[in-house]
């Protein structure tokens, strides 16, 4: 494990402050907030180390540098929709929730969204952030074009057609190739979604076959558990009214109202937060009434702060076919996790071809842990969690804390060496190398 990736808490603020939960203090010597492309060029040219900073939702040092951090939040908030081509060009610093509003007003939609609509488009893409759904790939899979500023100030337009041998390596670039200034995403016609939460999924529904049924019963499904019982505490169902994404055995059909029970879990009589003690008003509508995609697919509303900030996060993606075995391996650790765990979420992510996507080449299940801000307690339990998951070759989320050694992580990505070579070509001086990037260009992947 890289020393800089240990869970830590910081009371002080450096030049660039901390991440949104105040658990990581950036060590950068400077922070720049350019308002134009020319100003951004001058920033990049004026420092030997620079990295782009998104909306500061990462818990790892993935965005950090010992040089200058550059925030694109004050750059023009451009949104250019091509309805005929079904694409949208969007400024890198825009939040997904804001982009979704523009698309909805134009009768268009994103195919997937993460649980938080507050995250920036470029930052989410660079780290392969995802939502949920057995047919839904990570957010980065929607990218059809990138605009990338290199260390010499040249702006490149990258598409699969212009760079066929590099495109799949450049989309999830971990900020190591340059500063992404804009992205072009594939979109689709607008659709409506019904959402409801079901409680107490029985333990006998956690065999692999039953899990596949549960997780495939709607367009997007999330399971929440604290590992204290044999079952699952909450099942969040997000069902497209056109039936897209629901498996053939799903109890949900088209525009029908959502049932009172699904696979033994009963529908909650009132809205609920994944942490029942937290206000449900912070969450998206759970009434079962149809609504726009961006008001149902995220768990949380854009107008609310997503959390009290008292948390550290970890996440591991494993091949989906091993999910039942992985959950069985974790459950005996419930008593160890209990003092430092807020909640765990289980989601699914469809396979893609992006070299450094956590779901590259394999349909995946994501096991997410929202820990308390007890850094020492998390550091103590994390090795036990990773030991339990080790037989399933977990790939940790780049933006979360983890303890798996860098060479082990790299070994789980078939295109790791290709990405190292790619970074060497696009950034030979290491201007965009960061806190999780080793000095040797051949080992450019975080560890």
Image (tube, rainbow, N blue to C red):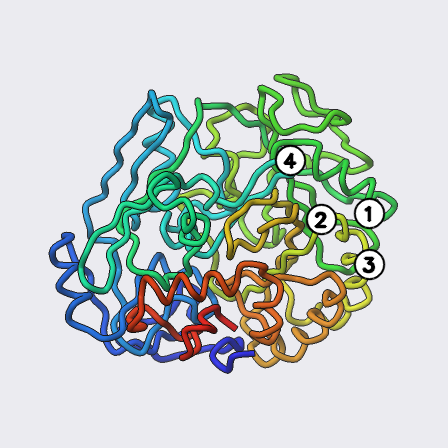
- In the image, residue 268 sits, relative to residue 380, either above or below, namely above
Mark nearest the camera among 4 and 2 is 2
**Position of residue 72 measured from the top left corner of the image (x, y, whole percent):** 25, 55
Compare marks 3 and 2 and give the one earlier in the sequence: 2
Mark nearest the camera among 3 and 2 is 2
Give the alpha-carbon distance from disc 4 to disc 1, as whole Å. 17 Å
**Position of residue 111 measured from the top left corner of the image (x, y, whole percent):** 49, 33
Choose top left, top right, bottom left or bottom right for residue 183.
top left
Give the alpha-carbon distance from disc 1 to disc 2, as whole Å. 13 Å
In this rendering, position of residue 403 left or right of residue 81: right
In this view, the residue in front, 283 or 33, is 33
Q: Mark 1 points at which residue?
A: 206
What residue is rendered at 47% in x and 77% in y?
Answer: 9
Residue 237's disc number: 4
What residue is rendered at 34% in x and 63% in y?
Answer: 425
Residue 328's disc number: 3
Give the alpha-carbon distance from disc 4 to disc 2, as whole Å. 19 Å
Q: Does dot 1 land on a helix, a strand or a loop?
A: loop
Q: Name the residue under label 2.
A: 320
Q: Does dot 4 land on a helix, a strand or a loop?
A: strand
Choose top left, top right, bottom left or bottom right for residue 213.
top right
Outermost residue toward the right in this view: 204
Q: Does dot 2 land on a helix, a strand or a loop?
A: helix
Give the alpha-carbon distance from disc 1 to disc 3, as whole Å. 9 Å
What residue is rendered at 82% in x and 36% in y?
Answer: 264
In this view, the residue in front, 122 or 290, is 122
Q: How crowded is mark 3: few (under 14 residues within 10 Å), some or many (20 or more)?
A: some
């Amino acid at each position: 494990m890289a020393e800089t990736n240990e869970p830590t808490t910081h009371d002080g603020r450096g030049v660039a402050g901390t991440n949104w939960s105040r658990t990581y203090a950036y060590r950068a010597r400077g922070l720049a907030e350019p308002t134009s492309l020319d100003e951004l060029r001058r920033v990049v040219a004026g420092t030997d180390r620079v990295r782009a900073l998104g909306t500061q939702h990462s818990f790892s040092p993935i965005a950090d540098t010992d040089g200058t951090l550059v925030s694109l939040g004050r750059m023009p908030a451009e949104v250019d929709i091509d309805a005929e081509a079904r694409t949208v060009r969007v400024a890198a610093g825009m939040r997904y929730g804001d982009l979704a509003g523009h698309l909805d007003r134009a009768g268009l939609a994103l195919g997937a969204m993460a649980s938080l609509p507050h995250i920036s488009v470029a930052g989410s893409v660079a780290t392969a952030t995802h939502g949920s759904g057995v047919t839904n790939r990570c957010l980065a899979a929607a990218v059809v074009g990138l605009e990338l500023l290199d260390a010499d100030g040249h702006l490149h337009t990258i598409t699969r057609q212009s760079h066929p041998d590099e495109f799949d390596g450049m989309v999830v670039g971990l900020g190591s190739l340059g500063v992404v200034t804009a992205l072009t995403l594939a979109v689709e016609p607008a659709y409506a979604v019904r959402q409801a939460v079901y409680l107490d999924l029985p333990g006998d529904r956690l065999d692999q076959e039953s899990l596949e049924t549960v997780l495939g019963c709607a367009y997007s499904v999330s399971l929440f558990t604290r590992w204290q019982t044999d079952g699952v505490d909450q099942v969040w169902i997000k069902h497209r009214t056109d039936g897209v994404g629901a498996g053939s055995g799903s109890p949900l059909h088209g525009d029908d109202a959502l049932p009172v029970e699904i696979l033994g879990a009963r529908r909650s009589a009132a809205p609920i937060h994944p942490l029942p003690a937290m206000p449900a008003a912070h969450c998206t509508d759970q009434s079962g009434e149809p609504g726009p995609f961006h008001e149902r697919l995220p768990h949380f509303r854009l107008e609310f702060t997503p959390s009290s900030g008292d948390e550290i996060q970890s996440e591991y993606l494993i091949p989906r076919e091993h999910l039942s075995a992985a959950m069985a391996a974790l459950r005996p650790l419930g008593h160890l996790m209990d003092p430092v765990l807020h909640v765990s979420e289980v989601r699914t992510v469809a396979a893609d071809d992006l070299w450094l996507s956590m779901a590259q080449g394999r349909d995946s299940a994501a096991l997410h842990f929202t820990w308390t801000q007890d850094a020492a307690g998390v550091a103590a339990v994390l090795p036990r969690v990773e030991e339990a998951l080790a037989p399933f070759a977990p790939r940790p989320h780049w933006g979360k804390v983890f303890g798996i050694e860098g060479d082990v992580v790299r070994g789980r990505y078939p295109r790791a060496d290709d990405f190292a070579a790619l970074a060497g070509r696009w950034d030979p001086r290491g201007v965009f190398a960061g806190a999780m990037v080793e000095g040797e260009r051949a080992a450019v992947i975080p560890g």
